[in-house]
Amino acid sequence: MKRILTPLFLGFTCYVSAQSLQSTNSASGKELPIEIKKDWFNLDYKTDKLYGTSTNKTFAELIGEKKPKKRIVVAVIDSGVDWEHEDLKDNIWVNTDEIAGNNIDDDKNGYVDDVHGWNFLVDDDGKDINVETLEATRILRLSKEIKDNDGEYPDWLTNDLINNALKIYNESVDELKGLQVFRMAFAISDSVMLSKFGEGYKFSQAAELNADNSTAEKQAKFFYEYIDKNGVTMKDLTDMAEHFDEGMLYQLNMEYVTRKSLTPDQKFYGNNHYEGNAADHGTHVAGIIASDRDNAIGSNGIASDCADIMVVRVVPNGDEHDVDVANGIRYAVDNGANLINMSFGKGLSPYKQLVTEAIEYASSKNVLVIHAAGNDNANNDEVENYPNIDLVANQDALSFLTVGALNTEKNKKLLAPFTNYGANSLDIFAPGSDIYSTTPDNEYEFFSGTSMAAPVVCGVAALVWAYHPELTALELKNLLIDSSMKLPKKKVILPGTKKDKVRLIEISKTAGLVNTYNAFMQLQAQ
């Protein structure tokens, strides 16, 4: 999930996680009531005055007691999923041809005990990878090794790629430098508060510190007063610290190497550790699609009555490997996935052809791939954001969708301020700010990102396809686009700016907002 750096006053740079962004109702300017906020992505524009998907209205008016004609297998290619979560466990894909725990490849697909999916995130010794380097780090490290040994550069390792890697690497270093002072201030202040008040201290207790006692107490008092005033939580602080530490120790560390022997032609590696140690993101994505909407607990997945989640783990904290992405797509297709959700991305892709061929393979097998546009408030027509289908000649014939994110607001702030866009590269928008869904250990949280918008579209796709399995993947893609709520003349603030306004059609292919109700109505009219 994209981490957002928000500049605050007094010279600090405060790291605020995307899930802590506030959602407001454009009519009142006040925060939405919590029960509405939790379910806004399912709500309807006319009835609820929010640009949700109208899924609840679809169930109430069009589906009723009708049963789906088919269960749809949705591969969540991500960081891992807590498949035993109370709100997901009944909607996890089961490979019925595999016998759990017998350490035998019963179905002869090359993967042993892959009952609920597969984990490709392993190192050369077969141990799980949780944190990886950035792709830029890997490229620069390889380039240095070749240069130091007077070796020959492979064709893909071009000067342009190396220069782009250097740019991304330096930008990432600068980001961490911006966090360094804040990280140190937090470490000192946290130590002071722990010694004075113990575990579970409250920010407000900093007022009891005596600033005359020591420099450390003075700093802690100022730090927590500042933090409390700006609405930052302890989770934000610990996330920031983790982000900084992982960046320094792993993501930008040229000496940190998890793989050297794995080559792009390998396929059969990994294990069945579906969750891993960083499954918040993947579990949240899975819940948007398929958390149980009928059990009166937790969150309301869009397609909970008809979707089974196949877990495919390829996304670490850091940049995913192209070979893992390609293998993850092919695993999903070959083992029965109908839909693939990919809520991840990066700026460099040395083996992009490998991933493109896997996406084309999915399309040829009647699988719809749905991808998040990215959270850099950037124009994807102008910047590199992978995976993409730039190498495909006839993109309209490919069952592939790129999704941008909406805010809860209906006015000029309709688009989430972080969302990427593109007149030639972004297909559709969907709710992506303050989305309430499952997280590991039977927990629930609000996350924001195009990472959330993509599974919203995936959930709608699964629901439609379950009741209309006669559609092909390409027909389903076109239906979602054609039936979307079109707002071509709608003026919105261009993401990444404060005041610049553009029409929605200028920054997307269709100016369309995905809508479940419209999709079902269009099919009924045919």
Image: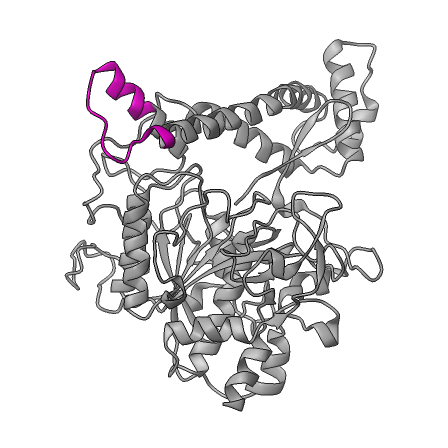
Bounds of the magenta segment: 141-160
The correct choice, above or below, for 449 with respect to 174 in the image is below
Instruction: Using the image as rendered, state which of residue 311 and residue 452 is in the foreground.
Output: 452
When asked about the image quadrant of residue 192, the answer is: top right
Position above or below: 88 against 325: below
Side of 120 where 175 appears, left or right: right
Residue drawn at (71%, 67%) of the image: 50
Quarter assignment of residue 208: top right
- Point out residue 439 in the picture as x, y percentages from the top left corner: 53, 52
Which x, y percent locates residue 127? 28, 37
In the image, residue 462 lies at what x, y percent?
A: 45, 72
Can residue 107 be seen here? The reply is yes
The residue positioned 32% from the left and 45% from the top of the image is 352
- Closest to the observer: 44 or 273? 44
Left/right of residue 215 with respect to residue 466 in the rendered view: right
Whole-percent x and y of residue 228?
A: 77, 34
Residue at position x 56%, y 74% in the image? 294
How did the renderer colour the structure?
Answer: one colour
Between 47 and 80, the residue placed more toward the observer is 47
- Tell me if residue 276 comes above or below residue 155 in the rendering: below
Is 156 within the magenta? yes
